[in-house]
Amino acid sequence: MWAYLLRRLLQMIPVILLSSFLVFLLLHLVPGDPAETVAGPDATPEVIQAIREKMGLDLPLPVQYGIWLRNIARADLGESYLSRIPVVDLVGHAFPATIQLALAALALALAISLPLGVLAAVRQGSKLDLLVQGFTALGLGVPNFWLGILLILIFALALGILPPGGRIDPLQQPLLGLKTLLLPAVTLGIHISAVFTRFVRVAMLEVLHEDYVRTARAKGLQERVVVIRHGLRSALVPVVTVVGLQFGRLLGGAVVVESVFAWPGVGRLIIQAVEQRDYTVVQAALLWLVVVFLLINLLTDIAYAFLDPRIRLTQGRG
Amino acid sequence: MGKDEGPFSLTRRALLLAGAGAAAAPLLARGAPATAQPAPAPSAAGRPPKRGGSFSMARTAGGRDLSGVNLTRANFAFIRSLYNSLIHLDKDLNPQPELATAWRFSPDGLSLTLTLRPGVRFHSGRELTAEDVRFSWEFAKDPSPLSPNMNRLFRQIREVNAPDKGTVELKFDKPCANVFDILDTLCLFDRTAVGKLNSSDAGSGPFMVTGFTPGVEIRMRRFDGYWEPGKPYLDEYIVKTIPDDAALMLNLETRALDAVWAPALHEVARMKGAAGLVADPGAGAQGMFHLMASVTKGPLASKKVRQAINHAINRERCVRTALAGTIESTCLMWPRGSWAYFGELEGRYPYDLGKAKALLAEAGYPGGFETSILLSRKDNPPQFPLAQIIQGDLAQIGVRARLEDLEAALYISRMQRGEFELCVHNYGRVNRDPGTTLAGAAPLYPKSEKGPIGFDSADFLRWRDEAVTTLDREKRKPLYRKIQEYFLEESFSMPIAGNQSFWLYRDYTRGMWYSRESSPFMGDVWLDR
C-alpha cells in the first residue's frame, strides 16, 4: 500500500510539470495584454509600455516561464500583477471558502441522494420512484443562478431569516458562518444531489439483481441489511467515482453561485484573474487545482479498495 | 441630492476678497484666502450629527489595491475615505481648502505656492509634510500598476519643491489652467507606507484599513487622529464586491447593505421613489458615452458617411431604453453643467434618416455598406443595449453593422490599437475642466499622439494646447467652442449621453457628498436612526 502511494505521488510530478507548461502557454496565447488591462482604456502607448516593463512582461516567454518555475521551486507563487499581493495569500484566502462550500454542498447532496437513490431503486416503478425521478430532472434542469436568486428572495427578502450573501468564517462566528453558508450550499447541493441520486439509483438497480443479493435474501436476512450492507456497499464504487469528480469540480470553484452569493471562493478569483489577465494568479491557482485534483483521484482509488476487497491497489493482482 | 458645499466652503469675506483680486489678475482670483475655515457638517433639520454606527456599501467591480491614484471605478468607492488631497473642487469647479489652506500663483502663472494645513497626521501617525506631497506627485506621474492612469495629467506639473515642511511649490513649463483638477485628483501618500498598498493604505483620510481582500471586501475603521475635529462620525465603513447585479440589489433590499454604488440603470429607475431609499446621481455625469468612428477604415474615412451615421442615431431612444431615462441625450462633448457646454450647438445632429441617407448617397454609398461595432458589455454594461439600438438605427439607412461584444481585456486592447471600425466607448472626466477631459481621454488624442481614431489636425492641437495654458476662462471658452465645432463637423466622435453612476442609499443616511468621481467624503456621513 505504501509503495503504491509513493509511486502515485512520484507519478504526479511529471503531470504537474506538464500542466504548468500547458497552463503557462495557453494563458499567454489568449489574446489580451495584462499591461493594457492594468493601464485601462485611457492610457497612452507609452504608459502601457512602461507598465509592461515594470510587470516583467517585456521579457521573452521562455524567460518568463523559467522565472516562474524557479520561483515555484522556491515555494514562491509570485505576486498578483494587479494588486501586488502574494498569490499564496490570495489563493490561501479563497481556498478555505471554496473547500467549505464544496464540503457543505457535497454533504447535503449525499444526505439527499443516498436515501432517495436507494429508495427509488428498491421501489422501482412506484410513485416514490417517479417522484424521485421528477426531482432529479428538476434538479438538473434548473439553472444555479436562478435557484440562488429565488432562495435569496424567499429566505432573505421575504422571510428575513438568512443573509443574502457574503461569507462569515464559521471558525470565528459559528452560527452566523453557518447561516451564510446555507443558501449557497443548498443552491449547489440540489443540483449535485440530482446527479448523485441518478447514479445511486442506477447502481443500486444493477446490484439488487445480482446473485449474491438474491442469496442474501434467501438466507433470511432482513431487507434493510440486504440493501445496505450487501447492495449499497457494492453500488458505492461507481458513486465514489462520481463524488470524486464532482468534488474536484467544486474545488475549481462554483463561479455562478459565488457571484450570486458574493462568496469569495477560488472560482471567482480565477475568473476575475482571467478577465484581468492576471497571469500569475491564474497560473498558480490552476496549478494548485491540478495538484488537488490528482490528490482527489488518489483518494478515490484508495476508497475503491476499501469498499470492494476484490480491488487491489498493487499491480498484477485482483 | 449630493452635498456640493461640503464643510470647506469659503467665507463671504473671503469670496469678496477673491473677487477683488479677480478684477486685477485672473491668477490671484483662484488663490485661497488665508482665513478659510471648514464649516460644520450639515445636520438634518437642525439636529447635530449622531456619532457611531457601521455603514456598508457594495458595488459590482472589485478593487484590486488600495492605491489612491489608481483611478478606476472600483477604487472610487473608498478613495476619499482613505486619502485627502490638497484641495477639492465644488460643483462649480472652484477649489476649496483641504490639506492646503492657502495658495498663491506667481504673477507669470508658472508657479503655485500652497500652504499646508499644520498638524495633519497619516494613519501611521507620521506628520504630513511637504516632502510627502512631492513624493505623492512623483508616485502619481510615473506609470506603474498602482498608478496606471492620468499620468499625463500629473506630468503637467514640471516640478514640485518643498522649501519647508509646510510649504509646497509647484512649477510649470506653461501656465496650467486645470491645475486644480490635478490637485483635486492627487491623493497624498505617506511615503513610508506606500510599499504596503497591497494590504494597507498610506493615507490621512477619516478612515483607515483594517482588512482588505482584493475583489471581495475592504473594512475600514474611523481614524481617531483625523485632522478635522469631531470627524468622522461613523465607526466603520465597509466596501464589498457583489459581482451579480441582481444579488447586489437584493442585498440592499434586504437591508444587508446601507448603500450600493453604480447599480444597473434599470435598477435605479426601479428603485427611484422606493420607500426608505434615496437615488442620488452623485457628481452627475462623469463620463460620456460616444460612438467612435475610425477615420482610416473604408467608408468611414468619408466625413459625409460619419455625419450620416451621426444623423441616424436615435439618441432619445438610446437614453430611454439603454440608460433607463436617467440622463439627457446630447451630441456635444461635454454635458450640460460644464462651462464648455455650448447649448446652441445641441441641435446640430437631429435624428433624421432622410438626411442621413442623402449624405450617404453624396458620399457614394447609396446602398449602404457593411461594418462592425466594437463594444464590451463586461467593461460597461450599457454599451450593449446602446450598440444594439445603434445597429438597428444604422440598418434603416442601409448600414449593416455586426456587433463585436468582447470581454474587457480584448476590448481595451483592440480599442487602444485602433482595431475597430465603429466602437462604443465612454470617456471620462467630463465634469471637470475641459482641459482635463482632453488630457485624460487617450481615445480622443490625434494620430500624431497615437490616438486610435486616426484623426489629425494641427488646428485641434493648437486650440487644445492653447486652451489648457490660458488661465482666463473667457479666453478659453472660444477655443473649446472651436474644438467642439471641429468634432461636430468631423463626426469621428459622436456623443450620445452622459454616463453617471448613481448611489442608492437608505434614507437614514445623512451628509453624503462627493468628489468629481462620485467618491463619497465619508468623514461627513452619519446615520440618522
Image (cartoon, coloured by chain):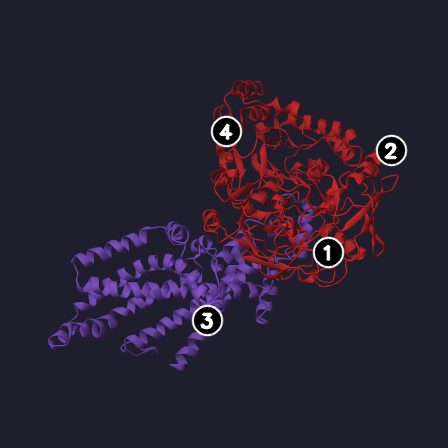
Chain colours: A purple, B red
- In the picture of the structure, the residue carrying the numbered disc 2 is B24
Q: Amino acid at mark 3?
A: Met
For the residue carrying disc 1, how many other residues have a C-alpha within 10 Å: few (<14), some (14-19), or many (20+)? Answer: some
Taking B401 as reference, is B303 left or right? right
Q: CA distance from mark 4 to mark 2?
A: 49 Å
Q: Amino acid at mark 4?
A: Arg
- In the picture of the structure, the residue carrying the numbered disc 1 is B227
For the residue carrying disc 2, how many other residues have a C-alpha within 10 Å: few (<14), some (14-19), or many (20+)? Answer: few
Q: Secondary structure at mark 2?
A: helix
Q: Amino acid at mark 1?
A: Trp
Q: CA distance from mark 1 to mark 3?
A: 58 Å
Which chain hosts label 3?
A
Toward the right, the furthest residue is: B107
Which chain hosts label 4?
B
Q: CA distance from mark 1 to mark 4?
A: 49 Å
- Residues at circles 4 and 3 in contact by the CB criterion of under 8 Å: no
**Res B173 → quadrant:** top right
Observer-nearest residue: B215 or A243?
A: B215
- Residue B449 percent across, percent down from the top left: 71, 39
Name the mark nearer the viewer: 1 or 3. Answer: 1
- In the picture of the structure, the residue carrying the numbered disc 4 is B317
Name the mark nearer the viewer: 2 or 1. Answer: 1
- Residue A288 percent across, percent down from the top left: 49, 66
Question: Image point 55% across, 63% down: which residue?
Answer: A90
- Residue B387 percent across, percent down from the top left: 51, 34
